[in-house]
Amino acid sequence: MSASRGPEMMRLIERLYPICRSITGDGVRATLDLIDEALGGSPSLDRSEVPSGTPVLDWTVPREWNIRDAWIKDASGRRVVDFRESNLHVVSYSTPVAPRRIGLDELRGHLHSLPEHPDWIPYRTSYYDESWGFCVTQKQLDSMTDPEYEICIDSTLEDGALSYGECLIAGDSEREVLVSVHICHPSLCNDNLSGIAVATTLLRELATRPRRLSYRFVFAPGTIGAITWLARNREQAARIDHGLTLVCLGDDSPFRYKRSLRGDADIDRAVEYALATAGNPYEVKDFHPYGYDERQYNSPGFRLPVGSLMRGRHGEFPEYHTSGDGLDFVRADRLEGAVETLQTVFEVLEGNRRYRSLSPYGEPQLGRRGLYRAMGGETDPGDLSMAMLWILQLADGDHDLLAMAKRSGVAWASLVRAAELLLEHGLLADETGAD
Ligand code: ZN
C-alpha cells in the first residue's frame, strides 16, 4: 500500500475535472495528454485519430464536436447561465447557436433541470440527433422570469476525428489482460474520472513489475470509442483472455462486480476471490446488457470475458450524471482501495496455473525431499506446508490454483510459493493451457 497514491489520483482528477470532454474533440485530446503526463513518459499512450465518417462495425465515427463558450443572458445583458462556470450547462454535442433573442416559452423547451435536486446541474447529451440545449439548476430555472433572453452556443460540429489512447505492456506471454476506461464525460468525477485515475496508476505501476501476462489499457470514449477500437483490432482482440471495465470507483459504496457474460471466466473468479479475501462487504451481479463498454467486448462476435468493477452503480446514486458528482464526491482512500483490489486481481491472474501431481498414488514423501520438516511432531504444520498438502491433494488437472485457494482457504502467496517448490522437486506438472 502506498500512502501517496490516493492523493496523487485526486490531483489528477482535479486537473482533469475542468476539461469539457465529449465523445470527440479537443477535450478528449487534452485528457489523453494529462494521462500521458501522469504516466511520466514510461510507459506512454499510443494515440489514434480516426476520421469522421469512418465505418466502425455497425456504426460510423461522428463529426467532431468542440465548444468555446455558451450563455443565456437576461434583458440587462447579465449571464444567468454561463458555460465558463460549468461545462455541464450545455447539452453535449449541441449544435452551434449564433447569438439571438428567444422568448422564455421557446427557451424552456431547450432547458433541462432536476426539480428533486434544485442545486444540481444535470448532464445531458445529444450525440446522435442534431439539437441544442442548456442544463440548469432548478433554482436558475425558477429565477428566469424575463419574457425574453439572449442565447449563444459557440460550438462547432465538423469533420474531424475520434481520439483514443492505448498502451500495451508486454509480458512473457502474448495473452492479454484488457483494462478499458471511458473518457468522454465532462466535469463529472466518479462516473469517469475515478476510472481514469485508477487505470493510470495501475498502468504506471504494472510497467515496473515482472509480468507473465501482457496488459492492454484502452482509454476511449464510451460506446463509439470501444466500437472503434474493436473494429480496428479484431485480430489483437483475440489475444484477450481477461478483461475489466473500470467505472465509478471513488464513491463510498462497497465494491460491486458485474460478471462477464460467461459468468465463470477466470476474470470473474479472480475478482470474486480478491473481493472475498479483502474482508469488506461487496456485491456480485451477473452480466446484464446495460452499463459501459463490457457490452461491446462481450458481444457475440467477440465474446471477450470482460467484467466491470465499480462501487456506486450507474443510475442508482442520486449524484449520477449531475454536478453533484463533483470533486467532493470522490475520495483518495476509495481510489487507493480500488488500486489495491485490482492489483490483487492481477496477482491472482499472474499466478493462476493448472497443475497435475506426478506422484498421485498416495501422498509423496515430503520429508525425504526436505519439503516437510517433522511432519508427525508439529501441531500446526504452517501455511506453506498446508498449501503443499492441499495442492498435492487437488492437483488432478481439473483444479487450477484459484480453485485450490477457494477450497483450502490458504493464502494466495503461500499456494504460489508451495506450487513453485513442488514443481522444483518434480512433484507437479504445469498443465496450464494444455486443454
Ligand atoms: Zn456516464
Image (cartoon, grey):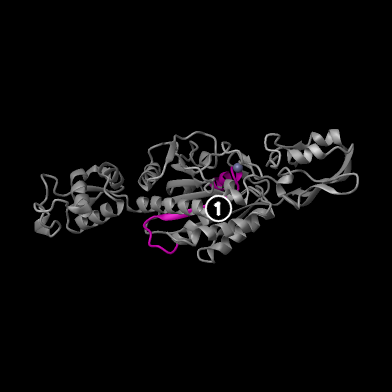
Mark 1, ligand 1, within 8 Å: the answer is no
Res. 64 visible in picture: no
The relative height of residue 247 versus residue 174 in the rendered view (above or below) is above
Q: Quadrant of ligand 1?
A: top right
Residue lying furthest bottom:
41
Foreground residue among 305 and 412: 412
> Whole-percent x and y of residue 104?
86, 36
Res 207 quadrant in image: bottom left
Q: Is residue 175 left or right of residue 435?
A: right
Answer whether residue 276 is visible to the viewer in this image: yes
Which range of residues does the magenta coloring cover? 207-231
* Near-viewer residue (26 or 281): 281
**Residue at x 61% of width, y 60% of height:** 33
Q: Which residue is mark 1?
A: 196
**Picture quarter with the C terminus:** top left
- On screen, residue 424 versus residue 96, left or right, reads left
Give left or right: position of 2 versus 128: left
Residue 381, percent across and down? 17, 52
Would you say residue 222 sits in the magenta stretch?
yes
Residue beneath the point at 65% across and 58% down: 30
Give the total number of marks visible in the rendering. 1
Give the position of the N terminus as an image quadrant: bottom left
Which element is circle 1 on? helix
Q: Is residue 290 magenta?
A: no
Identify the residue at horizontal 49%, vertical 53% (top origin).
Answer: 333
The residue depicted at 24 percent of the width and 53 percent of the height is: 419
